[in-house]
Image (cartoon, rainbow, N blue to C red):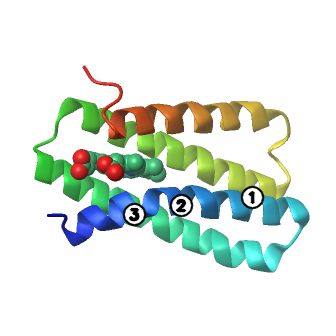
Amino acid sequence: MQTGMQHAHVDSWWLLIVLFLITYFLLRAGVNKGAKILHMIVRLFYIVMIFSGIYLLFMWGFPLTHVLKGVLAIVLIYAMEMILVRTKKGTLGSKAPMYWGILVASLVIVLLLAFRILTF
Ligand code: HEM
């Protein structure tokens, strides 16, 4: 049986990614008011993911793969936040490939670890 915290984590990770992308495209399109509200919701989701993730780590007794997954998830959140803030300020510029690279790489590894496709 799944606990509420497990649901919060497992059911909302994809929503965070979708909301992040919508916020990014709104910022690019200059729809600043809409983007501001969505960015706040995105930040709320960071907190939900981090808290529910830590809860799950306690539940599973801190398995190394998932501790690593948690650390990479923080890197992923950092990349998302930097992309949004720098897009808003217009300072993403030449740093764009680096931040998008970090985002894609960390997301792929987080998902491979989360779904236990990558195990060690
Ligand atoms: C944006 C950040 C994150 C994403 C995209 C993400 C994604 C996922 C996914 C897809 C799963 C597997 C869901 C399933 O089995 O259907 C999962 C499980 C898990 N996540 Fe995260 N996660 C994130 C952040 C975190 C953080 C910050 C931590 C820890 C501090 C964490 C710890 C865990 C743990 C322990 C599980 C295992 C749950 C289980 O096997 O039932 N996650 N996560």
Which residue shows up at 70% across the image and 56% down it? 84
Q: Position of residue 10 (x, y in %)?
A: 35, 58
| Gap between marks 1 and 3 measured at Cα | 22 Å
Q: Position of residue 97 (x, y in %)?
A: 76, 32
Residue tagged by mark 3? 11
What amino acid type should be assigned to the residue bearing mark 2?
Answer: Leu
Q: Secondary structure at mark 2?
A: helix
Judge left or right: residue 72 versus residue 14. left
What amino acid type should be assigned to the residue bearing mark 1?
Answer: Tyr
Please tell me which of labels 3 and 2 falls first in the chain: 3
Judge left or right: residue 42 versus residue 37. left
Q: Quadrant of the N terminus?
A: bottom left
Quick one: which residue is furthest to the right in this view?
29
The image quarter in which residue 20 lies: bottom right
> Compared with residue 77, is residue 106 higher up or lower down, i.e. above or below?
above
Question: Pointer 2 and pointer 1: residues touching (CB < 8 Å)?
Answer: no
Q: Quadrant of the C terminus?
A: top left
Q: Position of residue 81 (x, y in %)?
A: 61, 53
114 or 74: nearer the eye? 114
Mark 2 Cα-neighbour bin, 10 Å: few <14, some 14–19, many ≥20: many
Please tell me which of labels 2 and 1 falls first in the chain: 2
**Mark 2 Cβ and ligand 1 under 8 Å apart:** yes
Which residue shows up at 35% across the image and 33% down it? 113
* Camera-nearest label, 1 or 3: 3
| Gap between marks 2 and 1 measured at Cα | 12 Å
What amino acid type should be assigned to the residue bearing mark 3?
Answer: Asp
> Compared with residue 67, is residue 18 higher up or lower down, i.e. above or below?
below
66 or 117: nearer the eye? 117
Residue tagged by mark 2? 16
Q: Which mark is residue 24?
A: 1
Judge left or right: residue 78 versus residue 58. right
